[in-house]
Amino acid sequence: MTTARNILNSVFGYPDFRGKQADIITHLADGNDCLVLMPTGGGKSLCYQIPALMREGVAVVVSPLISLMQNQVAALNEVGVHAAVLNSSLPHEEAQQVEQKLLSSEYDLLYVAPERLLTWRFLDLISRIPLALFAIDEAHCVSQWGHDFRPEYSQLSVLHERFPNVPRIALTATADPVTRQEIIERLALHEAKVFVSSFDRPNIRYHIIDKLNSKQQLLMFVQTEHSGDAGIVYCLARKKVDEITEWLNSHGIRALPYHAGMSLHQRASNQETFLREDDVVMVATIAFGMGIDKPDVRFVAHLDMPKSIEAYYQETGRAGRDGLKANAWMAYGLNDVIQQRRMIEESDAQQQFKQVATQKLESMLAYCETITCRRMYLLRYLGETIVPEYCGNCDICLNPPKTWDATVEVQKALSCVYRTGQQFGVGYLIDVLRGNCTARVKYWNHDQISTFGIGRDLPVKTWRAVFRQIIARGLLTTDSEGYGALWFTETSRSVLKEQQRIFLRQLGVNDRFFQSMEPVGESSFSAAEQQLWEQLRAWRAKTALEHGVPAYVIFHDTTLKELVHVCPQTVEELSRITGIGAHKLDRYGAHLISILHRG
C-alpha cells in the first residue's frame, strides 16, 4: 500500500484512505475482481483510479452518461492524470485521435459508454493494448427492477469472456441485497469479493412534511434554509417541472428546468450551467441526476414521492457529496400514493414486474409514514443495522411526532369503504363521512347509509391524513384498474372486528425543522475569514471559467474552507491542505499564496 498511499497523497492530495478504500485498492491492484457498494461521496472513484495508476496498461471505465464521463476526465486531467473519454459526443477526427493515443499507450484511464464498449470494433481495439482493469460504474443499471435500468449493462459479462485475466471492479451507491445478487449474476462476478461500506450519510438531514401547498412550502424551505445554494428539485411530470421553475424564478431564485420534453441541446446546456455555477437550482424529472458529480449540492427536494427507497436514496444522495451539511426534503400527500399506484397498474410491464414495483412502493410509503428514525429505516432497508437507533439528524429524531389513538376513526373509514361497495376514491368517501350531500352522493343514495356524516367532527385534511396512513399500513389498497377506488385488504377486517388498535401520526407536527441548519462555511467564519472565503471562491470561479471546467474540479468547498481556517503562508504548508496534490500545488500554489497573503 506504500505506492497506493503515495499516489493518494501526491496526485489527489488526500492524507489517508477512508473506510474500505485501502482494502479494495489492494485487492484490485493484485488482479482480483470485486463488487463495491459505497454511498455517494464515499470515494468510489479512487478505488479504481489508484489501481489504474499502479498497474500496467490502460483502465477502461464503463460509465452510463456522457456528462459524467467528461467531468471525471476533466477532474483527472486537473491533477495530472492522463485520461480521455470516447463517446458519441466527439467529432470523428477527435475520436480517431483518442484511438491513436490509446494505441500508443498515452492514457492511464479511458471512459466509455456501454453501448460503444459492446461494439466489435471497440472490443477489437482494446484487445491490441495492455489493459490494467475494467471498472463498471453505476453497476445498479444492470438491475431490471431498477429505475435506472440500462439493457446494455446486462451484456457486460462479455468483458470476462473476452478478457478473463483482466480484473474487474463493479461499483454502485444503490443496491439492496436482491440487486447485489443480480449484479453478481449478470456481470459474472461469481468469484468477486464483495465490499459493502456503510450506506449512512450522516451529513444529510432527512425531512418529510405533509403536502398542503407544495409550491409555497418549497419556496419557504429554499428561502429559509438554502438562499443562494445549489440544489435539485424533483417532480414527477414535465409540466410540473416547468411550473415550479417559473415559480422559483418569479420569487428571485435562479432555477433551470430539465426533462425529456426539452431538446437534447437545451438539457445539456442547463446541466452544464448547473454543474459549473454555484447558485443554480435544477428542477427536474428523474431523467436528471444519475452520476451527477457536483459535490456542493446543498439540498435535494422532492415535490412528488419517489417510487422506491432505492430511487429516493440515490436521488437524495446527490446532496452533500463533499461531506458538508445538506438537506433531503420532501412534501408528500395522499395523491402521491394514488398516482404511483395508478402508474404501476397502467404500465405495460409484466405482472411480475408490477408486483415488485408495488412492494417497493409500499416500502416507500412506510418510510414516509414512519414514526421512528428515518435514517435507521433507510439503512435497515439496505441491509444495514446501526445502534443506537437514533440519528439526531432527521425530522423524527429532532422533533419526535405525536401519535393518537385513531382506532375508531379508522373503523369509520373502513366501514365507509365497505358500505359504499369499495367503488370510490378518497375524496368521495370523505364527502360521505363528513355528511356532504353532494349531487354524486345523492345519486348513489349514500346519504341514506349508516356511515353518512359519522365523521363530520374531523376536518377534510385530517381525514385525508387518516386515509393516507391506513393505505400506507396496508389496511386499504387502490383498485387494480387504476381509478383510485379503495379496496379492503386481508388486514382490514381485523381492525373492524376490534382485534387491534391503530395509532396514527398527528397531522403537521413535522412541517418545520426543530432547528435550522447553519449555512455551510459562513457560520464558522469571522468577518476577515468571510472576506477571504469570498476571494477564494471568486478566484476559483474565474479559474474554472478559463479552464472550461466546473468550479469543484479546481477545488472543493472543503478545500477552500480548510484554506480559510489554516491560512497557509508557504508552499510547504499549502501542500498539507486536503485536496491539493503535487500537480495542483505546482499549478495554483503561487496564486493561492498571493490571495492568502492579501487576506
Image (spheres, rainbow, N blue to C red):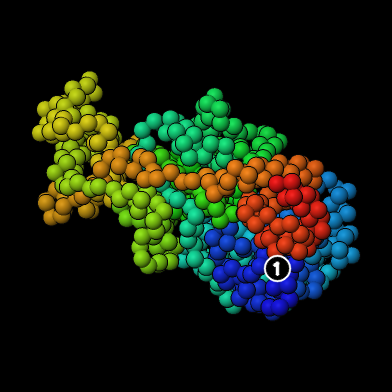
* Rendered-image quadrant of the N terminus: bottom right
SS of the residue at dot 1? helix
Where is residue 562 drawn, in percent x and y?
A: 63, 55
The image quarter containing residue 422 is top left
Tell me: 163 left or right of 417: right
Question: Can you say whether 515 is above or below 310 in the image?
Answer: above
x then y, percent, for residue 461:
27, 33
User: Residue at (84%, 52%) from the top-left corner?
Assistant: 95
Residue located beneath label 1 in the image: 8
Looking at numbered disc 1 in the image, what kind of residue is underneath it?
Leu
Residue in view at x 35 percent, y 53 percent: 397
Residue at image location 40% in from the left, 67% down from the top: 385
Tell me if mark 1 has few (under 14), some (14-19) or many (20+) residues whose alpha carbon lies within 10 angstroms of its own: many
Horizontal side, residue 4 vs residue 500: left or right: right
Residue 563 vertical placement versus 253 (above, below): below
Q: Position of residue 31 (x, y in %)?
A: 69, 78
